Image (spheres, rainbow, N blue to C red):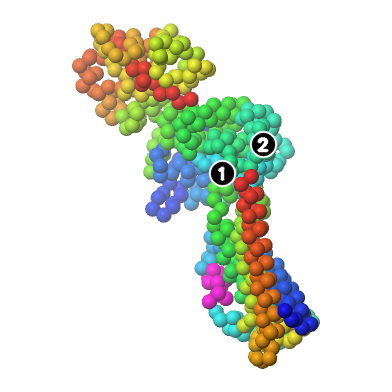
Amino acid sequence: MKLYIDVEKKLGEFSLQVKADVSGERTGIFGESGSGKSTLVHLISGLMQPDKGEIVLDETCLFSSRKKINLAPEERRIAIVFQQAMLFPHMSVKKNLFYGYKRCHSENRRIKAETLIDLLKLQPLLQRGVKNLSGGEKQRVALGRAILANPRLLLMDEPLSALDDRLRFQIIPYLRSVSEEFRIPYLFISHSLTEMQLMTDHILAIKNGRCMEETTPEQLARNWMAQSPKGYLNLLRLADPVKQNGLFAYRWGKNTLLVSGGDATGESLFELSSREIILFKKHPEAISARNLLDCTVTEMFESDGRIGIVLSVNGEKLVAEIVRSAAEELHITIHSTLFAAIKASSFRMLA
Amino acid sequence: MKLAPEDIVAIWLSLKVALTATALALPLGFAIAWLIVFKKFRGKVALEVLVNLPLTLPPVVIGFFLLLLLGKNGWIGKLLDSSGIPIIFTWKAAVIASATVGFPLLVRSIRLGMESIDRQLIEASRSLGAHWYDTLLTIILPLSLRGILAGSSLMFARSLGEFGATIIVAGNIPGITQTIPLAIYDYASSPSSNAMALSLCLVSVIISVTVLFLHEVLSRKLDRRSTL
């Protein structure tokens, strides 16, 4: 997918001015509330008209003030998954799902409805009304409805922010697997660094209606480390733990991690804040933290006066965060060997 | 309860006028409510004022304006007269009077129904490939049904009670343009006909209660359907 955007839009006091050339199948648009993310979604989808500029998706010009082109939303084939599922309340799940499908020209229909319904586990819900569905079910139906419209591009406008944490991370695998299975490129809009890390390869960061940078999820997480309330978030996928003295012992590459809250079956996703890792130059004598990992510094970066230390723990990557004075006192440089102490309760299970 | 044959005709005529006025005003009321709620255009405020004007004007004034417009020398009246369609002092004039007076109530209710629709539902529909008219029929219309129903009931009830504008443009001709309120007016002017007036009042109450009852039943049906 190639999306060229060069638009200007004034809305009262707020003005959006974005110029970007986005390519890739999994692109994120990152920004805080009020930064103009949703306005951008409206402009790309045709629900709002820019004051001037140009929007080109692949080879198709969607909008050009110069050439006086403005394709209607239904001609753009850009489906949206909103923050709230926005299911049509007077229709059943099945009718919601097929709303876009029925309006899609037969030559553009390449997605098999049965496959999608199976993938999203929607079969038992088909005949139900939409009002009594849970938040997660609603969002799965909304996703299915958008995909079945066979769009060229899927816009996901903060699709997880209305859900609680547990549901949020249960939906992410669906979002990813559906777009991968049916090869539909997407723009994922969010203000969550974790979601950006899990959902995107490439990010357009916007602030106050202006495009700030084009970056990667990793670089974005590093840039935001000092400002973010939780620092840099290490995301770890761990599976099949063994119970050990009331804790869960997970294999992590060649290492073992002791975690206080886990799930005995299957794979789980954990979040570990860079601020929860304590670094020692020498092996500490006796500590209460249940994880003491032998590691080597592979990279160092700075984020607003805080130092990010990228560690290799037997080949596995971990980012710790310390203040500059601590880095200087410990004489930490690249290739330094350190010990990282992490409490078993510092791991937060997301899904 | 005692009803004269002309009273039966008046009841029938009242129902016919109210039903026709509501049915005729409904598509236009829906279209105007849609324009006001969803479209941005110049003169929107003027349109809103025009639509709501009959709410604030005395019905007799509305009747007089209609008489000027539809009378033999009025520009619509002249046109219709040359086509052989007489309006003034026919039941059709009563329909026009009722439709004009009840129209703001209809538009207001439909408008309230439309304003309660989440804009993102409409955006979702458009982004899923629906043209504006498709969205209008499949999303806006069904989700405004409660407003349409409330507006129609209100307008029907208002039409049943319409007096001032009707007497000016349709007159009070028994068996031809005399509706229930006009018949009651006739009876009330002679003290010996109080019983007859009371009978017609009772009929009015029965019709109004039936309309309100039907409105409630249909509203509940809509509620049940939307919570399935």
**Left or right of A319, for residue B20:** right
Instruction: Same chain for labels 1 and 2? Say yes or no.
Output: yes
First along the sequence among labels 1 and 2: 1
Magenta portion: prevailing SS class: helix
Towards the viewer: B214 or B24: B214
Magenta residues (range): B46-56
Q: Give whichever of A8, B196 is nearer the camera.
A: B196
Q: Say above or below: A194 vs B3.
A: above
The residue sitting at 33% across, 31% down in the picture is: A229
Q: Quadrant of residue A308?
A: top left
- Residue A167 position, x and y percent, is 50, 31
- Give percent across and percent down for residue A169: 49, 28
Which residue is label 1 attached to? Answer: A86
| Label 1 to label 2: alpha-carbon separation | 17 Å
Image quadrant containing the N terminus of chain A: top right
At label 2, the amino acid type is Leu
Labels 1 and 2 touching (C-beta < 8 A): no
Residue A20 spot, x, y in % from top left:
47, 37
Name the quadrant containing residue B209: bottom right
- Residue for badge 2: A126
Q: Chain of mark 2?
A: A
Q: Nearer the viewer, residue B41 or A95?
A: A95
Between disc 1 and disc 2, the foreground one is 2
Q: Is residue B139 left or right of residue A291?
A: right
Q: Is residue A123 visible?
A: yes
Residue at horizontal 30 percent and vertical 11 percent from the top: A339
The three-letter code of the residue at mark 1 reads Met
Residue B216 pos. (x, y %) = 63, 60
